[in-house]
Amino acid sequence: MTKKTQNQIELLIAQQCAPVLAGVKPSNILILKAEDDREVCSCLSGTQISCHPLFNSPHHKVWLIYHRDKVQAILKQEEYQIFLEKEGYEGLCLDEMLEILRFRFECYQNRTGDFPHELGIFLGYPLADVKGFIEHKGKNFLYQGYWKVYEDVEDRKRLFSIYTTVKQEIVKEIETGKALWQAAGSLQALIGA
């Protein structure tokens, strides 16, 4: 991979996943061209970020980019466990859950299944917003930012503001020539994540 290509891919990762890179969000979806497949893992090396493929097509690939420990911490919370058990994730480890999620997301992308709303749990969305989205079929939300909000609007606005700020900072660092791991590390140190 050329330096220019790596920098371009790192910039795309930063634009889509900055809150995860900064350690203020447990995970995010990353969508890149299919031919950038190998570069994603290379760009994330040196960070504490894992990636799990969710969908492949001839044109693009979708990954879940995540902090393993942060996602596991969410999944250990009783209210999330109860929700996920109802969705068929009972008694599974994270890797098994990610495989089920991948299968369901793939079915949705191939139009052979419904959207796996439990994805919001893995992405760190508050349970109330995930349930609100399901109950209201994506309508009647109180606010929309990084996701549709169904309660605690002011809290979500503060959180979205943090996400936007870290995105701007990481993108600025990448644009000055820093590697993704350097930009993420310096921002994590700055915010104490």
Image (cartoon, helix red, strand yellow):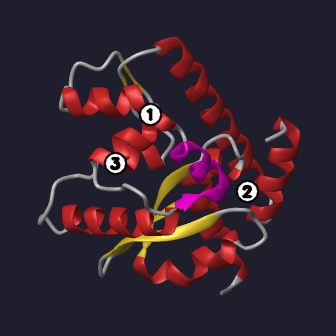
Q: x, y (%) of residue 89? A: 35, 56
Residue 138 makes an appearance in the image: no
Name which residue type carries label 1. Glu
The residue at the point 53 percent across, 12 percent down is 154
C-alpha distance separating marks 2 and 1: 41 Å
The first of marks 3 and 1 along the sequence is: 1
- Disc 3 on helix, strand or loop? helix
Residue 169 against residue 140 in the figure, above or below: below
Report the residue marked by disc 3: 85
Outermost residue toward the left in this view = 112
- Given this view, does label 3 or label 2 mark the residue nearer the observer? 3
Report the residue marked by disc 2: 175
Name which residue type carries label 3. Glu
The residue at the point 39 percent across, 70 percent down is 99
C-alpha distance separating marks 3 and 1: 10 Å
Q: Say which of 4 and 189 sits in front.
A: 189
C-alpha distance separating marks 3 and 2: 43 Å
Outermost residue toward the bottom in this view = 1
Residue 135 makes an appearance in the image: yes
Image mark for residue 79: 1
The residue at the point 49 percent across, 36 percent down is 78
What stretch of residues is rendered in magenta? 65-76
